[in-house]
Structure formats: C-alpha cells, structure tokens
Amino acid sequence: MSGTKEEFLKLISTMMNNNFNLQELYPNSENLEVLLEQIEDLKKSLDSFRPLEGMHMVELQDLL
C-alpha cells in the first residue's frame, strides 16, 4: 500500500489537533480477517517509523 504511510501521517496530524477518526482509513467491519488485516497494516505503518531519529523526536515533541 503505497499511500498508507502518507495517510497514516495525515491521521497522526489530525489526531494531534484532537480531530482523530481512524474510520476514515479503516472502516468498521464485522469480518475478523478484515480487522486483522487492518491491525497488521497499522502495525507495519508504525514499525516503518522505527527507530525514530533525533529530528523526528523533536517534531513529535513540538506537536505536543
């Protein structure tokens, strides 16, 4: 998913502005397989940021 990281960054930015809605990227589903895929996708997105470099830490702290 090429745009996943970009969409994730947009969601993080929105979350920092107290307007977070994860359903914009991952709609509700009753299907366990779909939910597990969504969780795996989110985990991969988070893992892609590790390890955080010094500049990223400064930017995150500035957002808080």
Image (cartoon, rainbow, N blue to C red):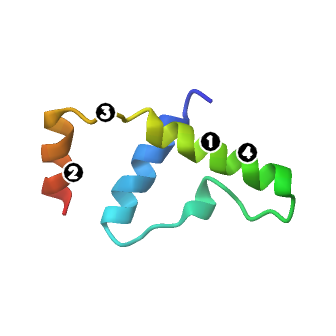
**Residue 54 locus on image (x, y percent):** 14, 35
Q: Is residue 16 left or right of residue 46?
A: left
Tag count:
4
* Pair 2/3: label in front: 3
Q: Which mark is residue 60?
A: 2
The reply to whether discs 2 and 3 touch (Cβ–Cβ < 8 Å) is: no
Please give the residue where the numbered disc 1 appears in the rendered image: 41
Q: Residue at x 13, y 55 (%)?
A: 62
Q: Residues within 10 Å of mark 1 (few under 14, many from 20)?
A: some
Query: Disc 4 marks which amino acid?
Result: Glu
* Pair 3/1: label in front: 3
Per the image, label 1 sits on a secondary structure element best described as helix
Q: Residue at x 31, y 67 (%)?
A: 17
Query: Disc 1 marks which amino acid?
Result: Asp
Q: Residues within 10 Å of mark 2 (few under 14, many from 20)?
A: few
Q: Quadrant of the C terminus?
A: bottom left
Q: Residue at x 38, y 64 (%)?
A: 15
The CA distance from mark 4 to mark 3 is 23 Å
Rendering quarter of residue 35: bottom right
Per the image, label 2 sits on a secondary structure element best described as helix
Query: Disc 3 marks which amino acid?
Result: Pro
The CA distance from mark 1 to mark 4 is 6 Å
The reply to whether discs 4 and 3 touch (Cβ–Cβ < 8 Å) is: no
